[in-house]
Amino acid sequence: MVNTDLAKAEPALIAAQNSVSGVQAKDIKELQGYRNPSANIKLGLESCIALVKNMTSAPNWANQVIPALKAEGFKKSILEFKKEDISPKCKQFIINNYISQPTYDIATFFRASKALGPLAEWTKSIIEFADIYERIAPMREELF
């Protein structure tokens, strides 16, 4: 069962990473320009920044989200992110406060921004993968 879940989650994660790799600098720059974003943009982007920064509270838009987007290597940090390093507290925070919200809708995020859709999709996919990874960790440790 767990292997089946993992087998489903991994291709979704790879597809999301490929989607992020297609994000252009101009698309990220568009997100940087939002000083007072809509609730939808805030929901999708805050989840991504909270994950990358391993946060357990909502990131402040002006002091944490925008600087993260402007940081050199932001996209690279997403593509090289180590899913095994997500803390259980961060994972649970993102599930509870972002992904489980009825308005956390990937299709809506894609319509809102060329960068937001892939970033939110990646966030959701990596959290789902991490959830399964965390469940199988005890079994993996028994093998080694």
Image (cartoon, rainbow, N blue to C red):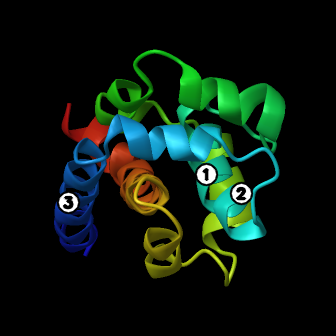
In the displayed image of the protein, which residue is found farthest to the top?
A: 72
Q: Quadrant of the N terminus?
A: bottom left
Q: Residues within 10 Å of mark 3 (few under 14, many from 20)?
A: some
Label at residue 42: 2
7 versus 139 height, above or below: below
Q: Where, by quadrant of the figure, is residue 58 drawn?
A: top right
Q: Which residue corresponds to mark 1?
A: 45
Q: Percent from the top left, x then y, of residue 84? A: 38, 35
Instruction: Kindly state the secondary structure of the residue where label 1 is placed.
Output: helix
Q: Quadrant of residue 90?
A: top right
Residue nearest the observer in this picture, 78 or 99: 78
Three-letter residue code for mark 1: Leu
Residue 67 percent location from the top left of the image: 66, 24
Q: Is residue 69 left or right of residue 23?
A: right
Judge left or right: residue 17 versus residue 33. Answer: left
Upstream in sequence: badge 3 or badge 2: 3
- Residue type at numbered disc 2: Lys
Image position of 114 with respect to 49: above or below: below
Residue wearing tag 3? 15
Q: Badge 1: how crowded within 10 Å, few (<14), some, or many (20+)?
A: many
